[in-house]
């Protein structure tokens, strides 16, 4: 049985202002990071995505990560 966990994803924009926010229901932190990378690539003005587990920052993904750069992934922990 798979257990879904809730992660929060914030997509920060180049133009500033409040970030786009989405709740991600995933089975692992890796799944949440993958979904955040997808979301980041879909937002033209996005500069980075942050994945949070409650009040703990799990990952920061700069735009390069969504474009396939292996150096783009940064662990926050």
Image (cartoon, grey):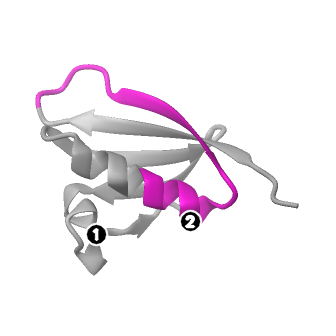
Q: Could you tell me which residue is drawn at 26 percent across and 57 percent down?
A: 62
| Front residue of this view, candidates 30 and 19 | 30
Place residue 54 in its image quadrant: top right
Q: Which residues are magenta?
A: 15-35
Please give left or right for residue 68 compared with residue 33 in the image.
left
Residue 57 image position (x, y, % from top left): 54, 49
Q: Residues within 10 Å of mark 1 (few under 14, many from 20)?
A: some
Kindly identify which residue carries mark 2. 30
Q: Is residue 20 magenta?
A: yes
Kindly identify which residue carries mark 1. 72
Q: Secondary structure at mark 2?
A: helix
In the picture, the quarter occupied by the N terminus is bottom right
| Front residue of this view, candidates 50 and 66 | 66
Place residue 23 in its image quadrant: top right
Decide: is 34 above or below 7: below
From mark 2 to mark 1, how far is it between C-alphas? 14 Å
Please give left or right for residue 38 compared with residue 27 in the image.
left
In the picture, the quarter occupied by the C terminus is bottom right
Residue 4 image position (x, y, % from top left): 75, 49
Decide: is 43 above or below 41: above
Q: Could you tell me which residue is drawn at 47 percent across and 40 percent down?
A: 9
Decide: is 66 above or below 23: below
Residue at the bottom extreme, as displayed:
70
């Amino acid at each position: 049985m798979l257990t879904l966990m809730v992660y929060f994803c914030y997509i920060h924009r180049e133009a500033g202002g409040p970030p786009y926010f989405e709740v991600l229901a995933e089975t692992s932190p890796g799944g949440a990071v993958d979904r955040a990378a997808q979301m980041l690539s879909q937002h033209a003005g996005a500069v980075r995505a942050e994945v949070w587990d409650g009040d703990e920052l799990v990952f920061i993904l700069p735009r390069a990560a969504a474009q396939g750069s292996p150096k783009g992934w940064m662990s926050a922990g």
